[in-house]
Amino acid sequence: MNLLDAVLWLPLAGFVLLLLIPRERVRAIRQFALGITTATFLLSLALLVGFDRTSAAFQYETNLPWISSPEIRYHIGIDGISLWLVLLTTLLSPIGVLISWQHIDRRVKEFFALFLAMEFGLIGVFVALDLFLFYVFWEVSLVPMYFLIGVWGHERRIYAAVKFFIYTMTGSVLMLAGIIYLYIRAGTFDYPALIEMMMNGSLMLDRMEQNLLFAGFFAAFAIKVPLFPLHTWLPDAHVEAPTAGSVMLASVMLKMGCYGLLRFCLPMFPAAARGAAPWIVMLAIAGILYGALVAMVQPNMKKLVAYTSVSHLGFVVLGLFTFTELGTNGAVYQMLNHGISTGALFALVGFLYERRHSLEIEDYGGVATPAPVLATMFLITSLASMGLPVLNNFVGEYLVLQGAAQVNFRWAVFAAIGVILAACYMLWMYQRVFYGEARKDFSMRDANLREWAVMSPLIILMVWMGTYTQTFLPPITASSAAILEQTKVNVEFHVERQMPRQELANAR
Amino acid sequence: MPTSVAEEYFPVVLQVLVAMAIAGGMIAASALLGHRVRNPVKDQPYECGIQPEGSPRERFSVKFYLVAMIFILLDIETVFLYPWAVVYRELRLFAFFEMLVFVVLILSGFFYIWKKGALAWSMEEKPREKQ
Amino acid sequence: MPANFVPPSGVEYIRVLPEIILAAVATLIMVLEPLTPAPRKRALGYLALAGFAGALAGAAAAGWRTGPAFSGMLEVDGFATFFRLLVILAGLLVTLVSFPYLRREEAESGEYYALLLYSVAGQTIMVSAADLIVLFIGLEISSIASYVLAGYMRREKLANEAAAKYFLLGSFATAFLLYGIALIYGATGTTRLNGIAQVLSDPRMAPAGILTGTAVALMLVGFAFKISAAPFQVWAPDVYQGAPSPVAAFLAAGPKAAAFAVLLRVFMTAFAPLTGRWLAIMWSLSLLTMIVGNFAALLQTNIKRLLAYSSIAHAGYVLVAVTAHSEEGVQAAMFYLTVYVFMNIGAFAVVAYFSRKGERYVEIEDLAGLGVRQPVLAALFAVILLSLIGVPPTAGFLGKFYIFQAAVKADLLWLTVLGLLNSAVAAYYYLRLIVIMYMKEPGDSLLELPGMAVSTRAALWTSAAAVVVLGLFPALIR
């Protein structure tokens, strides 16, 4: 039992205790949920204290037997990548509770209970080091989100919730088939053990096996990321979800897919991953451009933000499949950036919705006049999201683009167009919502204390991550270097294929 | 001496064929040779020369079926007593207790149908209507 | 009768203790039934409950002293004990669900409980049979009692239809089975399962391939009917819909589990030498069953029919485990069937309670708003439904995992992938129930919903708890 166990199980304990609070005591329920999520966050901050930032090894490990046949272990631990993703989850959870404070006014108890259950699942996904355990958490996080969308969402919530569930479920059963196959082949679900066996050559998957297993895992992760053209569930789910649901979905749940790609697809099936990389990169770039172009024409703010996710996560996938240190670091950084800035965007859109009960851009205009603070918050977040230097997204996108350029300069060029488009759609939306003639029937209060509490940590982080990357990058670099090392095992063809292009890129 | 299965059964097959041929032949012969005159009287069902009255379809009381079924059940159960009696001497006490169980089972079944009124012929005597 | 006859020893009676207890209690109930005045019929139900509890203890005692019984006609081993406990437990849970149901429908009678007990007795005989004749007798005892149970509400049109259909098709299927048994006896000269295996595996005695092939096919038809595998599944939806809900729960639990037990035993022992010949059939049977069950369930609007098709689909999953024909496969099937019994009885318990007098509310739409009006009940139902989908950490997921693990190990990769995709399809129709429970506004009909009776509640809680606990600690029964 160490600190990480406490971070993982505290939300679940909160879930159980919350069920004991009578449903009429709405205020107590909210306060309790906030207390639990905040406590989890503070606990997870303590993880930083004992964390060795230079090591790529898993830390805070717990390894206990759970089910004896087949041998499934409760094996958790974090490295430099999952550390930040856990922190992202625990940070956004109290923020999600605050966002839902007034927004959720019916079935409050169920909402916060499910919210805590979801936090448990999300943290679990990032800390599980046993494939079976990982799958369990993967699905455990799915169910609460399904309810959050389906019960507390907007008009077409049921359609969106079911679509979300079926898409994810289809992907994950394919991953399950892969996990089972891997277990039969290797005799263990233990991730470090599997990697160890692959590194020292005691587990050799031939090319065909790798391709099929990669396809199974990739299907689950690509749907979750979501990679173009598997993204169609995302706009529906984002738009229909309640604000806190959108925030958690965009900020944390999409990272599950990216994390899965990085943690499992690349190091376990390197040959297949490298073989498929050109195609996947093409899809990623298509996603970047498609997401940006579609976002541009959205009349609905939430939908717009949803499509920016498709675009931004294209960068993450692009970075991962460059197989360069810069690209991988950038991808991980971009995962965190997207979590912060898109989470903030959804929260802000939610605040606007609470005021006017509309998500349509055309229902707004001139909001900056009655609500200057809100407008400033929105402006900073938009600038961060479009990748302005000094703010967080710039760092991630820059690293990804540089990594891409090392492999193939054209990739970087096309992806960079996405950055330009981002500036267009974000600023255009900002202009239409906040500037212009203030509507007559308009009464809008400015940000209140709760909204300050939500936004200030996010904005501080945007600046911090954009200016002082040394806080965040070293653990990521250590771990992603280790993963890149693992992707070189058992790959005979990548050298002759990649070198000329790299030289070419350097020459330019 | 027959040497194979086919040879062994050949006479049987032959007999079946002959039987079918004779039966078929007789029906065919009567159909071909017979002289037929159709009139309403001939088309009537044969009732020993008496004019038929009413519909030939008649519904029997369900009691007949019930009694018939009970009879068959008890009758078959009685049949078990014969082989039992034959081997009784060899099986001794075991057979006795086995049969005791068997008879108790039959008697409880009998008790059930009796009390349920399956044996009561007319409605009035039926002790209790179920539900 | 041979002169060297040795009467059965005492331990052999212990080995059939559950059957003795079940049959004795059932007969006692039949005798007491005419003597019990109508308002006090419930007492007979309690007696049945005690009978099931006693039979559980008896089965445990029998499991303590494993071995053959009655000149090798029965084989009481771990496998038999496991399934005996399972079917008796299913009977017990169904009895609990039946109490308030029968009272509500004003149809309490001793016969109902006696028939349940007899049917379970037949199933315990089936699962411990080591001889095809005994197997057949067990199957008939179980089936005939369940035919009557299906038509228990004899004034209901649908119940009549259900019973007639079940009886006619069921007899037809048993005829197939019997014909298969006759052929296999003709081919091998024995009806003992291990004797058949011996003859079939001995190349010098190998009987004509066409004879054994036909026998296997005919017996498979008989079993496929009993487990409602496609294309022999058409009876199931009509029967489940027409039968009283507790009976439907019973039909999908006890007889199905027992039929799977004998299917496993016969095909894994007696027909093991012929594995190469039935494997392809079993493969297609399982795939077809999954597909037919899941896709037909998508279209249902009646909860009972939906659960019937879901039960067909789940039979398909278990058939995947049979197709794996390995030790893992058998264990996976055993685990899955246990979990399924709980899930199924839990789901039907909700239907039995929810449908109200005369089973008027059995459309999916009627569930609207249950999540608001009865949050605890709805939560339990949701847990069971999630387990039916196969979402971790419920036992339904682990059951599927074990099955497909066995399948992968047996190199059934495509069956695994198709089966798993099937379970993704299945998610849709189970989710629809959850959607309607939680995400639709409650209708007026829910206002008159009475509280749930204690015994149904006990059965539901047991089922839901079992689903969760077995999902977390499968070692409890493996």
Image: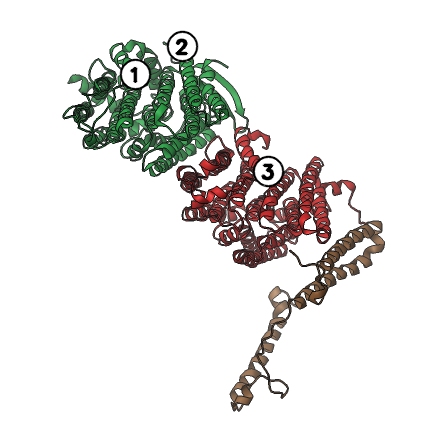
Chain colours: A green, B brown, C red
| Mark 3 lies on residue | C454
Amino acid under label 3?
A: Val
Residue C387 lies, with reference to residue B46, above or below; the image says: above
Q: Are marks 2 and 1 in contact (CB under 8 Å)?
A: no
CA gap, disc 2 and disc 1: 31 Å
Q: Looking at the picture, do discs 2 and 1 lie on one chain? A: yes
> Is residue A94 visible to the viewer in this orientation of the structure?
yes
Q: Decide: few, some or many residues near mark 2? Use Cα within 10 Å; few <14, some 14-19, many ≥20.
A: some
Q: Decide: few, some or many residues near mark 1? Use Cα within 10 Å; few <14, some 14-19, many ≥20.
A: some
- Label 2: chain? A
Residue A51, label in figure? 2
The C terminus of chain B: image quadrant:
bottom right
In the picture, measured across the screen, residue A88 lies left or right of residue B86, that is left
Amino acid under label 2?
A: Phe
CA gap, disc 2 and disc 3: 53 Å
| Residue for point 50% across, 15% down | A1
| Mark 1 lies on residue | A452
- Label 3: chain? C
**Quadrant of residue C76 within the rendered picture:** top right
- Label 1: chain? A
Label 2 or label 3, whichever lies nearer to me, is 3
Near-viewer residue (A499 or B78)? B78
How far across and how far down the image is residue C290, in percent?
Answer: 45, 45
Residue A136 lies, with reference to residue C292, above or below; the image says: above
**Quadrant of residue C327 within the rendered picture:** top right
How far across and how far down the image is residue C187, in percent?
Answer: 61, 55
